[in-house]
């Protein structure tokens, strides 16, 4: 056959011929039993000595890749592909577990920075006191602050654990001392540690449906059988919990993504169920600091009297996701195992950041920042809610919520649109908004949208929703014999509409 070999570059010619022939066999370009050119012929084509080609052939024959047949020529061995990888398989010929072969999550971030950023769970970095934070970190990055060259306490910086215990005790009525707190790299690592300690292969884990996709996928990656439990206006339907569930993951203060709190009756029922079944409840209190109205209900952890609740918190929403600081508060019976898992996972955290955060909390700066951010987010929440009720009433029905960085809206029964088409239109228009369907793991999804307001500047909310309304109109199935609606051809109607920026969207 006519096989191409490139000799460009430097180095031993025989070695380059050997490498390219070997790669061709492993890639399947040279198939088992295929005949190679005689050494004399290939040497003539490449303008090298015959001995140079012969050395490459001999090396491949010695490794069992080629075989010579007297009077017939040199052939690819009939068995070498057992050592090779398929043409499109990952290098090395090995494959990950089935779960990881298509790891792209359903909440894939948009490419580049969206013009209208309604992403969920993203705080406004412009509200963060960078100068103050820089001062606190600089204070810790001095030789006098580096008291030890070791890894430090695997549970986290002692000062931060004390500060966290005080903070959640005052702000959320969580019953904890510094010894009960384990500092983690965000809430996701907290969930990972709990899963490592609690989940055996085949163990059943219950999650909210709809719910937080990274938690579901994490538990599945650890070998759990994950079951979705429906959510209604009072939160998780405790009566629908499977009897064999060993672990239950809930977001009772601000259900993710719908937004309602779990009722006190449901909280009591869940704790009673966990005590009776010997199960563990993971309470993810991910953004309850941003509460706009009503007094928050007591967390499950403060109501728990039998040691079945692990409380998980994070500073990613209240401060910055890039800091990667979270924590968990666990019953005493689980603390040794969780600390051991933490040690095996990462040998401790970044202590200068943790020490700076301890100072940020102790000096009252976190409380001040949260109060300022809450006022700002409350205004954005109310602005979006007003526009949805006024201009999207034919399409969307907002779900009541009083906290957090996002709100959810169900599609009305007569909307006549497909939310997948709406979100696709939004992406093309530079709007980052998420389909509620992406938060369902099993059950048929109730159609709707989830709108975050942490990252979008207030001055862009109106224009972004005007453009989103165009997506609804473009995706709507027109009634029979209805006249076509002519849309402006010059971009965002909010900037050029004769009705002005305060006019309705529909």
Image (spheres, helix red, strand yellow):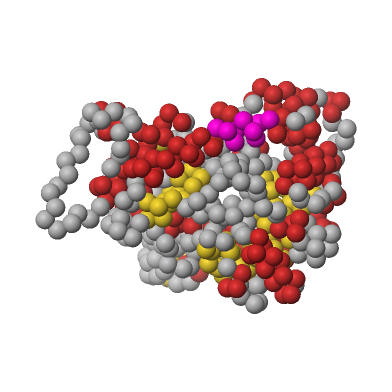
| Residue 60 visible here | no
Specify whether 102 is left or right of 352.
Answer: left
Verify whether residue 79 appears in magenta: no
**Does the image show residue 29?**
yes
Q: Position of residue 255 (x, y in %)?
A: 57, 55
Q: Quadrant of the N terminus?
A: bottom left
Which residue is painted at 88% across and 32% down in the image? 147
Give above or below for 187 relative to 26: above
Q: Is residue 67 left or right of residue 207?
A: left
In the image, taking residue 2 as reference, residue 283 lies left or right, namely right
- Who's the residue at 70% across and 53% down the image? 298
Magenta segment boundaries in residue numbering: 368-376
- The relative height of residue 232 versus residue 43 in the rendered view (above or below) is below
Residue sticking out furthest to the front: 294
Quarter of the C terminus within the rendering: top left
Q: In x, y percent, where is residue 23? A: 46, 55
Majority secondary structure of magenta residues: helix
């Amino acid at each position: 056959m006519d096989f191409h070999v490139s000799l460009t570059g430097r180095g031993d010619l025989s070695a380059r011929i050997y490498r390219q022939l070997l790669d061709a066999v492993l890639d399947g370009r040279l198939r088992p039993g295929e005949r190679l050119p005689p050494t004399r012929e290939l040497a003539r084509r490449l303008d090298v000595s015959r001995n140079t080609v012969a050395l490459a052939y001999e090396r491949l024959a010695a490794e069992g890749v080629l075989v010579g047949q007297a009077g017939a020529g040199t052939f690819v061995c009939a068995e070498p592909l057992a050592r090779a990888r398929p043409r499109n398989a990952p290098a090395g010929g090995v494959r990950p577990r089935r779960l990881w072969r298509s790891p792209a999550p359903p909440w894939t971030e948009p490419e580049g920075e969206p013009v209208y950023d309604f992403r969920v769970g993203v705080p406004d970095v412009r509200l963060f006191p960078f100068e103050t934070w820089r001062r606190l970190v600089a204070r810790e990055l001095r030789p006098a602050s580096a008291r030890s060259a070791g890894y430090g306490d695997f549970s986290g910086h002692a000062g931060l654990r004390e500060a966290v215990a005080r903070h959640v005790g005052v702000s959320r009525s969580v019953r904890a001392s510094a010894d009960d707190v384990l500092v983690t790299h965000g809430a996701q690592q907290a969930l990972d540690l709990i899963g490592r300690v609690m989940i055996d292969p085949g163990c059943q884990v219950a999650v909210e449906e709809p719910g937080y996709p990274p938690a579901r996928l994490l538990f599945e990656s650890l070998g759990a059988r994950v079951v979705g439990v429906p959510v209604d206006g009072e939160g998780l339907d405790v009566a629908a919990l499977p009897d064999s569930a060993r672990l239950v993951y809930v977001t009772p203060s601000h259900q993710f993504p719908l937004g309602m709190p779990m009722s006190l009756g449901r909280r009591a029922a869940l704790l009673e169920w966990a005590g009776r079944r010997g199960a563990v409840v993971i309470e993810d209190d991910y953004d309850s600091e941003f509460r706009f109205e009503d007094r928050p209900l007591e967390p499950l952890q403060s109501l728990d009297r039998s040691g079945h609740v692990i409380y998980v918190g994070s500073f990613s929403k209240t401060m910055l996701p890039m800091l990667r600081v979270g924590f968990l508060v666990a019953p005493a019976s689980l603390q040794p195992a969780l600390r051991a898992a933490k040690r095996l996972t990462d040998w401790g955290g970044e202590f200068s950041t943790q020490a700076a955060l301890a100072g940020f909390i102790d000096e009252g700066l976190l409380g001040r920042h949260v109060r300022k951010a809450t006022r700002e987010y409350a205004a954005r929440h109310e602005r979006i809610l007003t526009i949805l009720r006024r201009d999207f009433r034919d399409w969307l029905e907002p779900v009541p919520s009083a906290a957090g960085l996002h709100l959810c809206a169900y599609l009305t029964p007569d909307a006549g649109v497909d939310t997948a088409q709406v979100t696709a239109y939004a992406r093309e228009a530079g709007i980052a908004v998420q389909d509620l369907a992406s938060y369902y793991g099993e059950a048929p999804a109730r159609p709707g949208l989830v709108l975050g307001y942490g990252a979008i500047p207030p001055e862009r909310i109106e224009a972004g929703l005007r453009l989103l309304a165009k997506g609804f109109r473009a995706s709507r199935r027109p009634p029979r014999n209805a006249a076509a609606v002519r849309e402006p051809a010059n971009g965002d109607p909010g900037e050029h509409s004769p009705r002005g920026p305060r006019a309705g969207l529909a």
